[in-house]
Amino acid sequence: MLSAPVGALTVLWGAATATFFAQLALPGDRATTILNIRTGQAQARTPEELAPIIAQFGLDHPILVQYADYLGGLLRGDLGTSFQQFRPVRDIIAEQLGATLVLAVAGIAAAWILMVVWVTLTAGRTPRIRALGSGLDTLVAGLPHYWLGILLLLVFALHLGWFPVIGGSSPADLVLPALTLGIPLAGFMGQAVRTEFEHALEQPFVLSARMRGGSDLGIRLSHVLRHAVLPAITLTGWALGSAASGAVIVESVFSRPGIGQTLVAAVGSQDLPVVTGIVVLVALVYVIANLLVDVVYRLIDPRITA
Amino acid sequence: MTLTAQETASAVIPDADAVRLSVRGLDVGFTGRDGRTRSIVRDVSFDLRAGRCVAIVGESGSGKSVTARTLVGLTGEGAVVDAAELTLGDVDLASATRAEWRGIRGRRIGFIQQDALVSLDPLRRVGSEIAEALRLHRRGRRAHRRRRVLDLLTSVEVPLPERRARQRPGELSGGLRQRALIASAIALDPEVVIADEPTTALDVTVQAQVLALLEDMKAHGSAILLISHDLSVVAHLADEILVMRAGDVLEHGTTSEVLRAPRHPYTRALISAVPGAHTRGRRLAPQQEPAPDPHRVRPDTAGDGPVVQARGLVKRFRGGLLAVDDVSFDVHRGETLGIVGESGSGKSTTARLVLALEKADAGEVRLLGHAWSTASERARRSLRRRVGVVHQDPLSSFDPRWSTERILQDAIGADAGGRSARDRRVRDLLAQVALPESVRTRHPLTLSGGQRQRIAIARALATSPEIIVLDEAVSALDVSVQAQILDLLGDLQREYGLSYLFISHDLGVIHHMSDRVLVMKDGVVVEQGDADRIFLHPAHPYTRELIGSLTTLENPDDNGGAS
Amino acid sequence: AQSAALAEGAAPASGGTIVYAHQQEPPCIFGGWIEQAYISHQVLDSLVSRTADGEIVPWLAEKWQVSDDGLGYTLTLKDGVEFTDGTPVDAEAIADNFDYWAAGGNPTAAVWLDGFYESAEAIDPRTVVIRLSRPYTRFLENLSQAYFGIQSPHALQTRTEEENCEAPTGSGAFIVEEWNRGQDVVLVRNEDYTSWPADAEHAGPALVERIDWRFVTDATTRVAALQSGEADLIYDVPATSWAALEQAGYTLEKYVTPGRPQQISFNTVQGPFVDENVRRAFILALDREAIVSTVGQGVIPYEGNGAVSRATPGYSADAADAYTQDITRADRLLDEAGWTGRDADGYRTKGGETLEVLLPYGAGTIINADGVAILQAVQEQAKAVGFKLDLRPLSPAEHFSGEFSGADTHDLSVGYWTSVNAGILYINWRPSTPEKPNLSNSAFYDDPELERLILEANSESDRETQDALYRQAQEYIADRALSFGLYDRLSTLAVSPRLQGVRQEQSQGGPSFHDAHFID
Amino acid sequence: MTALAHPSPTRTAGRIRLRTGTALSAGVLALFALAALAPALLAPREPTAQDFEHALQPPSRLFWFGTDEVGRDLFSRIVHGTRESLLIGVGAAGLALLLALLLGSLAALGGRLVAGLASRLIDVLLALPLLLFALLLVAILGPSATTLVISVGVSSAPGYARMVRGQILSAKNAGYVEAARALGHSRARIVGRHILPNAMRPLVALFTMSIGQSIVWASGMSFLGLGVAPPSSEWGALLDAGRAHLLQAGWLTFIPGLVILVLALAATTVGRAIQEHLEKGEGA
Ligand SMILES: Nc1ncnc2c1ncn2[C@@H]1O[C@H](COP(=O)(O)OP(=O)(O)OP(=O)(O)O)[C@@H](O)[C@H]1O
Ligand SMILES: Nc1ncnc2c1ncn2[C@@H]1O[C@H](COP(=O)(O)OP(=O)(O)OP(=O)(O)O)[C@@H](O)[C@H]1O
Ligand SMILES: [Mg+2]
Ligand SMILES: [Mg+2]
């Protein structure tokens, strides 16, 4: 449905427009907020105080003109300049989105590994093991990120010292944040995959593979898994697309940079170009993630067409 | 079967008639959830010899597949297997370990599963499915395996093997899929081949090819266990026949003994229930009187004219496929029009056009003298109850949330009067299609294919229609039940003057039922006429080919030339 | 002057990187927010520095002279100091900075200059004269705040806003090397540093090579980072971790910020608190000291004074002690004020109207978790005398929009304002007039008498008299129950024993790393 | 006679276990319901009653779940917070599903234009970060349970809407719809009796699952300072408030987290059981 570039563009335009206008509903006056952030105070401001800021950012132009300017910039690939950081929004996002995507990809990878191992081991076994398997899926799917993150941090970083508490950008620093993000996701994917997995296990081709002399584990991995992973792929696309929102708590606990934090700060400081820019780029990630999902879908199940 | 030189060499049977697999006193049961063991198969004994074929026949659920699966140690979860003897050559299967079983499966025993169309992994290439057996048993390197796959596909007469090996099962027709499955089962030249219903759901032409293939394998020294519920199929291949019912072996003898001089009444019933040319106008099941339907009145035959009038129907699907091309026919009151043709020839599409479930690109259908295909759906709605339909895929035609009872009540609708009248009607309908009361509360999903098909028929009858479109309505039934249903349809027609549009790929059924026959190929009607005329004096070459490949019971001696 | 402070004995080991886990990340390094002051203090030198005992000592200004009328400040600059871009720190540069601040280059500095500053003029390369429109005795103290950090005018004029935001050019002990947004700012030693303040412990460039100024928002993570040795010191130590860290051998530093403490002021122009007695009753209902000592676990000091904190010169203990919990009196005052009825939940009513008051607060921005606990305790105690106190957390967007700062939006407002002296009173209590609105007056109490007191104090050159005037102003505020104190705002640090010489800079309490060094 | 011993794990044990699991979950839910309706029955103390003498007490016989920094009893607070938490969970899940049904049905059953617009809207909403929506909404409406319900509900709606659309589309093309048409049933009857009920089926499990998810989401909002106003003891807010004392009084964070987990687990388990029942039994 997003395969057409037109669809993708519509989504980007829609996201940008919705975000632009939604911010108009934010309380108070934008110039006041900008000034208050610069002083750390929260109070009303006099017109004299605000005049330079209004002039600087053209906040006195009619809103439609501002919108048209913004869209025009967007078409030229110019996302504008931050009201607070004075930097091009493109730079801000480039910096932060990368960090979030790295975390999201690592988290998704962790989720896949955990999910595949756990489902392969427990799906379609004795009722007791099956109950254990799906029970754990449900349990971890409901783990609050903060809770899980801080638990991992205290146990593995502080007490055992296996990983750093405040990481930088080395791979080891990514382990705990990725697990924090990945474990609940693994639970989610597990719930969906398990059903499919057990369904696929009962298909005649599985029996037919056994009749060729295949081993149980071999059949699970080489035949059954492939039939079961489609919902997990969808969830992966979703997780990638929603990384900005999903990772914000993890990033905060492990004090990593990230687009979510930037978004939170930008909404708080009414930094409209940053907010809109982030949303446009996040939507772009979403669109790309969906295109990838479609491609992977077709790789896994060639029966699926357009 | 074209064989490579190497295979021809190995095909020289070292010791013909040697016992490959021996079964004595096999009992199988399943332990249920309540912990009680239910006996499924009792006291089955037979020997599979090189170059010979043993067939097991019997109605659905009689334990044929269970017996077969037991021979490869895959009876199923909760199975309890007991046998006085169960040996494969020198191996005692009764004490085989998991690893030993894995070594036996595929290498010494090739198994062609019952559900051929879904027994290949739909996501993997056909080539790798076939190569899997080689890979699992470590036969050769990748390149060698690939060559072997192509040889195998060639040997099972798959055209363009290079291309087919790269395709996925879904891209292959049923017949090709069945052959690919056979190729994967015989990849390692197993000494024993088990073929469970290898021809069900195949067109007659393809069915004949598959049987020929098995015949060839037999000729090259394989010991074959053939399983079928269709006596006419086994008649040509088997040397010995076991007749099973409800887990018991009723009769065991050579093919000609069993077919010529059946000892057990069940076997006799089975033979006589096979529809065909010789059964036309006869009841197939020996029993009961025709059951009159009290809910029906005989329609007045005044205003005769065709009840269905189809003119120049054309249907083109997206992608340009011409599924139905200029099809015209009439169905008269009290008449059965049969439609035969290979898979994909446009039979179902024609039926759907007649039912106005699909919009024709050209042409018109008139129904009971009314404008039909050109009318609005609103206008059609009032007429719809006078046309019944049995869909080709009954399961998907039932709302999965609904029980049998609710499905039938929904079809009966308000016109059957009060609640108790409706309940009675449901019970009568179930009785008519020979279903037990107990299925009332069951969901179609939990019923067997045959039972589902009968519910679909009951639903079609529920509105007391004057015309019924039956698309493969009896294909999932075993002969005895099929006989009952065909008898029922015949009775209703005689009694109330119903008209049928009867679609089947089973020529015997068509010949048994139809007054007139329409032969379709690639969306075109190649021949149309009186049933006997078509079957006895086919005019079109395609019809001739079709009828030529028909296997019938009438010549049981004419079995494969191996022995 | 600085040579006196030179470390005697062995020179401390030089080099290494300090990992400092700070809480919040500002949008720019230099600006009017305290988070910016903390970090720009490392990069920019100010004209003067404030010592622990409140004395003003030379920094970029070597000496100074105040004219007799108190309106002219003649500052003599250190010789040969250069900004890190090579331009000299001369009188012209200082004058340019004053104009830059006043024009909004630093809005907080602008507020401090507002009403006093007139002009800055370079007399010769080393002499600059600042002219005030009215005397302001503690003017130089204000200049010790990092809002008044001196930047290279050349950099301000020639570089982009973005560059000046990311890496302001000063003459300080450290230079911004890199800012990994969302993670850390890396500061590198200014090898050519010559302008350390007079209260520095050693002469010469900073001892450590680098500072990794990390942003670690989660308090637990910060403490864990310190305990695991990944951070050498952390900012804002949670009260609950205080004792444990102290026991484990960490050095804990606490700086009580002068200026306005964490206080609650009443809306005196609308709602129930127009009535002075209702205001009094509210304060009397609370046992603030018990609340603060319970939640603060002895770490957070109770502050009764609603005008300035105990660390502020001229602090009035009397104003702080003006109210102690007296429920009987509170009840009586409310009865007298006509709030005699009770509704189903036990809240007082008058004419069918419930005694319901709204307190919005910036959640996570100015009120941290401890603060929220304290406010909830206040809520519970106010309930005992019949106040229905609604707490309304404000998201940062709401908070900074100023939407909840108007007189018609709330009954109570909570907040602090750091400052080095009681001059904050003028900012917080100057009456608002149509020509010269004062939107920082959160009680909306426009009283010329109070203004006169404060202005007189600000201009008074005799310390004793000045302090007395300031005290009078505080008591005036307490008497009228315009505002009451809750607790003192703290700047806290927990420092690893390996790291020595970290000072808390004495105008706002941030860390100062010039003297910091590792020991083995 | 030789006996082939096939591994035959008895299902019986598992079935009973599964049922006890469901029963246990149902019991837990009932307990939560009771806590929501009549918290005073279960809670030994007032949720806001302070006791400075007993601040930050670890769980004990007197204070089952310990006390917080002003000596409020965590157990009582959790019990009294149940109503709001359930309201958020059920409300957000319900709102999400309702919106999803609306959008999804429009996108699947509407005319060309309506369906196209609805589908695009779903796509755009999906592409917007949930967080933005939550942040904006809280900034506009202020933090409250209602805000949480709306923001969590609306932000999870588009994902569900897409599911609903898919479900309806596949139900629309199902054989039973055609069979119903062949029986002469009206379009309204077909949509009402077949398409919608069948499309709805997987939503039961989804609903119960998203109850837990919504509460988890709400706790995330509290983490970002966008939760409900104090002194509410909504669980997400409790979880977040405990953060400040994590190292010294971990129970203040871990117990509310556990409670959320237990609810999520119980709701999902019961939801699955209902779903299974619907799949087997007569559709409701
Ligand atoms: N794994 C199993 N567990 C329990 N019962 C089973 C199992 N497999 C088969 N059965 C039962 O054993 C009986 C025989 O089944 P089987 O599949 O052998 O029949 P069949 O003769 O092959 O029938 P069909 O012609 O329909 O294939 C049936 O009643 C079936 O329900
Ligand atoms: N909805 C559709 N869209 C596209 N192609 C279709 C559709 N329905 C049928 N076809 C194609 O039209 C052709 C005729 O199909 P039809 O179902 O009528 O065959 P049939 O004779 O009933 O075959 P079978 O015996 O397998 O049921 C086939 O090639 C089929 O793939
Ligand atoms: Mg079978
Ligand atoms: Mg068909």
Image (cartoon, rainbow, N blue to C red):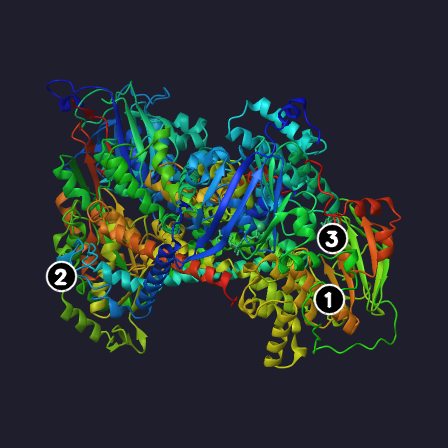
Label 3 crowd (10 A; few <14 / some 14-19 / many >=20): many
Label 2 secondary element? loop
Q: Chain of mark 1?
A: B
Q: Residue at x 52, y 43 (%)?
A: A207
Label 3 secondary element? loop
Q: Chain of mark 2?
A: C
Q: Earlier in the sequence, mark 1 or mark 3?
A: 1
Residue hosting label 3: B506
Calculate the distance from the C-alpha at mark 2 to the C-alpha at mark 1: 100 Å
Which corner quadrant holds the N terminus of chain B? Answer: top right
Mark 1 is on which residue type? Leu
Mark 2 is on which residue type? Thr
- The reply to whether discs 1 and 3 touch (Cβ–Cβ < 8 Å) is no
| Image vertical order of residue C356 relative to residue C98, above or below | below
Image check: A65 left or right of C453?
right
State the image coordinates of residue C434 (x, y, percent, origin top left): 39, 56
Say which quarter of the image contains residue C236: top left
Calculate the distance from the C-alpha at mark 1 to the C-alpha at mark 3: 17 Å
Q: Do tags 1 and 3 sit on the same chain?
A: yes
* Residue C138 visible in the displayed image: yes
Label for residue C108?
none
State the image coordinates of residue A257 (x, y, percent, origin top left): 39, 36
| Front-most of residues A281 and C102 | A281
State the image coordinates of residue A226 (x, y, percent, origin top left): 52, 40
| Image vertical order of residue B471 relative to residue B94, above or below | below
Nearer to us of marks 2 and 3 is 3
Q: Chain of mark 3?
A: B
Q: Do tags 2 and 3 sit on the same chain?
A: no
Label for residue C324?
2
Residue hosting label 1: B489
* Residue C395 visible in the displayed image: no
